[in-house]
Amino acid sequence: MTRTTPPRPLDVEELFPELAAHRGTTTRLHPRPGDPGVEDSSVGGPMLWPADEPWPVCTAKHKRSRGRRPEDVHRERQVLDAAWERDPVHGPTDEERALLEELRRRHRVPEVGDTDPLPMLGVAQLYARDLPDLPAGPDGCDLLQVFWCPFDAHGVNMTGMALQLLWRRSSEVTGATEVLVSPPRPQVVGSPGYVVEPCVLHPEQVVTYPFAGLLPEDLCDRIHAREDALDELAEEEADARALAQSRAQAQSGDGEYEEGPDGLSYPAYQYDLSIPPGWRVGGFASWHLTDPAPMDCTACATPMELLLTVDSSEWDGGSGSWRPLEDRGPGVRVSSTPTEAVVGRWGELNVFACPSDPGHPHRWSIQ
């Protein structure tokens, strides 16, 4: 099934014609649970990996001997999904709750040392043929494979993530060598959010615009001024409703009064009109958690471009206008977290690539 982003609530270029010069595109991946193969673009699916090629490992020194078993993480999700599908009111039975408690237990693997090679987990593999906004790979490579270490134990503060991205030519593997069937996996993981559920993709190219803070100053100021005025109007509307409710309760004497909707809803640039939520390739990065930071290539100082966004959810309360049409309507039960990946504190990971030389080291930011 395809996934279709609803039309935007308004034409932002009618409000701000200058945005036409900054218009871009991004390809939403729309991952959904499925059974992808090695020749498919996927999230959390099997990799097209030569059987005689070493699997990526983390060699950084950090604790890696205590955590949850990956198979228990998958099983927990299966039990919960089945329970809530069967009984949307009460969910798991007492027996299932006991099982879930056991599956959530952390285990210790004493034979694993702090510097032992730790198999990384596959996050995504993306074929250029499927994704029009996937930036070009180096030397004609058409397949991007993404891995991460399943522990937050990296960087200066030993609390960050570790990524490994690999480009390859798929034709050099397909039909030319034996493909790895059972890749190595870590015995335990530091966080269940690193264990990604297998998902097939439903790529869709949509229009996008830069984060407001990266637009020309005058244009950014006008966008913010419009939304400040709408915020002020919303507060006035809320105060008026609260006053009307108070008077109605006083007159009725019984406290019964039907309250109107909260606030004044309007399409906001950040949430509805510029950058879509969810997994995607290409386009513009969001900087909603921090101020925009320079992302220059460490090898040649060229300003880098967004390669991939890994998001903890496909939509939330503030970005629900991006929810695909196929995932709406009465009786439609679709999770906004199909991959079960969690970045930071339910944020998103933006990975950047050098446009001058895609083989240069990648950089990333968590928002």
Image (tube, rainbow, N blue to C red):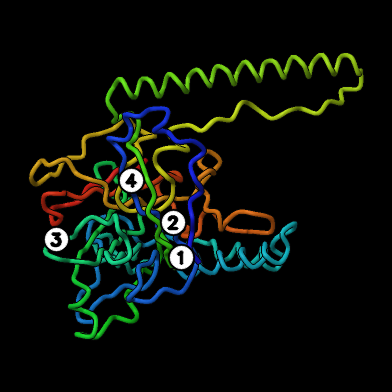
- Label 3: few (<14), some (14–19) or many (≥20) C-alpha neighbours in 10 Å: some
Task: For mark 3, give the secondary structure.
Answer: helix
User: Toward which corner of the image does residue 255 lie, by quadrant?
Assistant: top right
Q: Secondary structure at mark 2?
A: loop
Residue 151: x and y in percent read 35, 55
Q: Is residue 123 left or right of residue 197?
A: left
Q: Which residue is mark 4?
A: 159
Q: CA distance from mark 2 to mark 1?
A: 8 Å
User: Helix, strand, or loop for circle 1?
Assistant: loop
Residue position marked by numbered label 1 in the rendering: 197
Foreground mark, 4 or 2, reads 2
Q: Are marks 1 and 4 in contact (CB under 8 Å)?
A: no
Q: Amino acid at mark 3?
A: Pro
Q: Secondary structure at mark 4?
A: loop
What label sits on residue 341 in the rendered view?
2
Give the Cα distance between marks 1 and 4: 23 Å
Name which of mark 1 and mark 4 comes first in the sequence.
4
Label 4 vs 2, first from the N-terminus: 4
Instruction: Answer left or right for 97 relative to 227.
Output: right
Choose between 356 and 163: the one closer to the eye.
356
Which numbered disc, 3 or 2, marks the residue that appears first in the sequence? 3
